[in-house]
Image (spheres, rainbow, N blue to C red):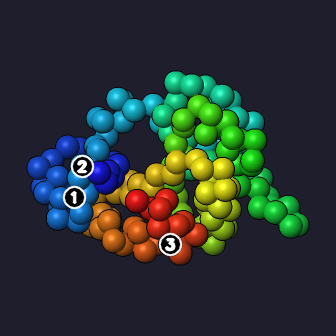
Amino acid sequence: MNYDFVLMKKSKLIEKLGDQLGFGKILFEEDFKKINIQSGKDENYNRSILENKNVDILLNPHLVKKNDKMHQRNAGLNQVLCKLAKENKIIIGFSLDKLQDSKEIGRAMQNIELCRKYNVDIAIFSMAKSKYELRSVKDLSSFLVLLGMSSNQIK
């Protein structure tokens, strides 16, 4: 079943739009309390989150304030953190509202590649703040292929 997180109050209109866009369920702001989602920061913070077995989703680990290195992006994940995520069954999440420029997209692509290599589950959310920011499942799938996800990961 396809899910999407939105940053709106619960409404029948948004649920109907989500159904038309191909989502099985739209999760609203009040649903966030049921799921333990932590936003990523830097590698040390991300590590502490991934070692915690009570977390369900690490969201946007690529939002690191450090500059990139010469031959590698500073993307907030590495092979050790991916292995921790796999062991503790923590999903790595990305939200479309945080993929605004080429630096963020490049970091997300690197993290998706690491997650694919270490079989870590990935989730993508629109985090729409209005009905106009909602995207269909097919639009998200196409974007994910561009970011480097395989069709098995997208399913």
Q: Is residue 108 above or below residue 77?
A: below
Q: Is residue 35 above or below residue 1?
A: above
**Which one is nearer the viewer's eye here, 121 or 144?**
121
The quarter holding residue 40 reads top right
The mark total stands at 3
The amino acid marked with disc number 3 is Val
Q: Earlier in the sequence, mark 2 or mark 1?
A: 1
Which residue sits at x=54%, y=37%? 90
Q: Nearer the viewer, mark 1 or mark 3?
A: 3
Q: CA distance from mark 3 to mark 2?
A: 22 Å
Q: Earlier in the sequence, mark 3 or mark 2?
A: 2
> Horizontal and vertical percent for residue 122?
51, 51
Q: CA distance from mark 2 to mark 1?
A: 7 Å
> Horizontal and vertical percent for residue 123?
46, 52
Q: Is residue 1 above or below residue 131?
A: above
> Horizontal and vertical percent for residue 105?
60, 67
Q: Is residue 84 above or below residue 2?
A: above
Q: In the rendered view, does 95 fall on the left or right side of 118? A: left
Which dot marks residue 25?
A: 2
Q: In the rendered view, does 74 fall on the left or right side of 62? A: right
Q: Which residue is mark 1?
A: 18
Q: Which residue is mark 3?
A: 145
**Which one is nearer the viewer's eye here, 106 or 83?**
83
The quarter holding residue 42 reads top right
**Which one is nearer the viewer's eye here, 107 or 129?**
107
